[in-house]
Amino acid sequence: MQPPHFLVLFGLCSVSILFNVCSSFSLNAISRRDAIAAAGTFIVFPGNVKPAEAFDNSMDRTKFKDRPKRKGPQPTDLGIQFRGDLGDGLKGCGAGANCFSSTGDPELDGYYLIANLFVPPSTSTSPMKDVADAIEKYEVGHDNIDAGGFKIIKKDEGYVYAQFESLKNGYIDDVEFAVKDGEVLVRSSSRLGYLDYGVNAKRLNWIGKSLKEKGWKVKEINRSTHRDYFEQNNLQ
Ligand SMILES: *[C@@H]1O[C@H](CO)[C@@H](O)[C@H](O)[C@H]1NC(C)=O
């Protein structure tokens, strides 16, 4: 009776949605009993609408459940860090039209730079709380983006880090806010690919609108501020 359980486990391991879980199982060489217990748990999955790893606020992904999620690797250098000539700051962006950041060389990186995108009111004592509140209210699936939901991974007085997920392919974007010398730094970036079809701009603009309601001074990202991004992504 036990061998079939194993077959089920390894059978499921070929479904790439479970790949991470399964590969870590084989790496850890877990006991036979644990493997069987785990197999018992996994057997429940195929009937589930949402696999356990989806964000709680994801829209229904049933239609895409056979599509492997392509989360991409989380960058290891998020947060405020020393960025060479640019000093301390959030991570910059690569060459792709799929990222915006407050950190970069204005001469070389103008295509993705967002200097002073969001400025809190001078009376604000806890800008990161405003930011976290705005994210909590985020409308999953607005403008056809981020329908895979989102999650705030980390928040404290000086920093907020959230992940946003696309519905169809399960791409994860990393979104960060940090306070440095009284200024709010922002980065929103896809992990994979070269284009983002406007997702990072639409997301930041949505969060910006929400902050504006709390009295923040907010700049919009649009074709006249970031022409290259809009052209490469073929957006109006
Ligand atoms: C684009 O955004 C900038 C500021 O972010 C704003 O001044 C300008 O009016 C906007 N342009 C359009 C066409 O909406």
Image: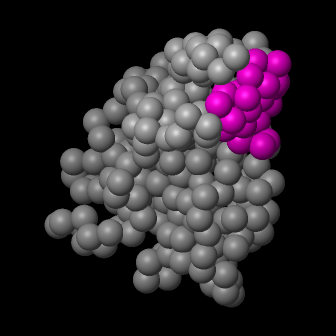
| The image quarter in which residue 170 lies | top right
Q: Report the magenta residues as a range.
A: 36-61
Q: Is residue 26 left or right of residue 218?
A: left
| Residue 174 drawn above or below residue 153 | above
Query: What's the residue at 52%, 30% (across, down)?
Result: 22
Instruction: Check if residue 51 falls in the magenta segment.
Output: yes
> Which residue is found at the position 17% from the left and 66% from the top?
85
Q: Quadrant of the N terminus?
A: top right
Side (left or right) of 134 relative to 10: right
**Residue 94 visible to an observer of this rendering:** yes
In this view, 46 is above or below 157 = above
Q: Residue sitting at 50 percent across and 75 percent down? A: 179
Q: Residue at x 65, y 57 (%)?
A: 152
47 relative position to 200: left or right: right
- Nearest the viewer among 194 and 65 is 65
Asked whether the viewer can see residue 143, the reply is no
